Image: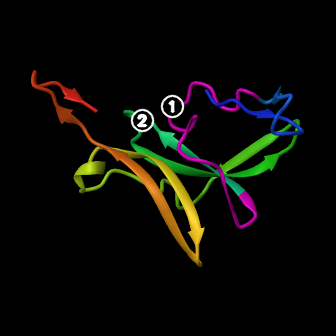
Amino acid sequence: MLELFYADAITGPWHRHPRSPLISGNNRIARGGGRVIVLNNRPVRFTQDCFPVYGTTVRAFEVSLLTASDYGETELPFSPLLMAGQERWRSEGMHHIDPHFVDGEWLACVDGWRFELREDGKRKP
């Protein structure tokens, strides 16, 4: 479930947005996958796509409408932007991104995952 709150000041008081929960029962887009950034003067929200399992890919959504009473977003065309790869550290998926624009170039800190086999032969993340 994805909830949205707003306040006039960072110290509050905080109010539940009238559209909350924004997303309920959808494990493909409800879980956060990084902090919100501003790209081309628009907020971008990253999500963990947890289908068929936790943290399979990271998707990106442009927040197209954000007021005290309404909310809207659209998935960006380059989404999903992170996914499983051949490297061992992300062989099962990727679930987090923290992008930074530094000296005219993008730099992203990312988080991937893989399964390991326990001594009893069962998989553990």
> Looking at the rendered structure, which numbered label has been put on residue 116?
none
What residue is drawn where x is 42% and y is 35%? Answer: 51
SS of the residue under disc 2: loop
Q: Main secondary structure of the magenta part?
A: loop
Estimate the x, y position of residue 100 in percent, counting from the top left: 57, 63
Left or right of residue 4: residue 57: left
Left or right of residue 55: residue 16: right
Foreground residue among 56 and 89: 89
Q: Residue 124, relative to residue 81: is it above or below?
A: above
Residue range (magenta): 20-42
Label tally: 2
Q: Label 2 is placed on what type of residue?
A: Phe
In the rendered image, the quadrant that contains the N terminus is top right
Quarter-of-image position of residue 24:
top right
In the rendered image, the quadrant that contains the C terminus is top left
- Asked whether 103 falls inside the magenta stretch, the response is no
SS of the residue under disc 1: loop
- Asked whether 27 falls inside the magenta stretch, the response is yes
Whole-number angstrom distance, CA of label 2 to CA of label 1: 7 Å
What residue is drawn where x is 80% and y is 48%? Answer: 65
Q: Label 1 is placed on what type of residue?
A: Asn
Estimate the x, y position of residue 38 in percent, counting from the top left: 69, 59
Q: Are marks 2 and 1 in contact (CB under 8 Å)?
A: yes
What residue is drawn where x is 84% and y is 31%? Answer: 12
- Residue at the extreme front: 11
What residue is drawn where x is 10% and y is 25%? Answer: 119
> Could you classify mark 1 by the number of other residues whose Cα lies within 10 Å: few (under 14), some (14-19), or many (20 or more)?
some
> Looking at the rendered structure, which numbered label has been put on residue 51?
2
Labels 2 and 1: the sequence-earlier one: 1
- Residue at the extreme top: 120
Which residue bears the numbered disc 1?
27
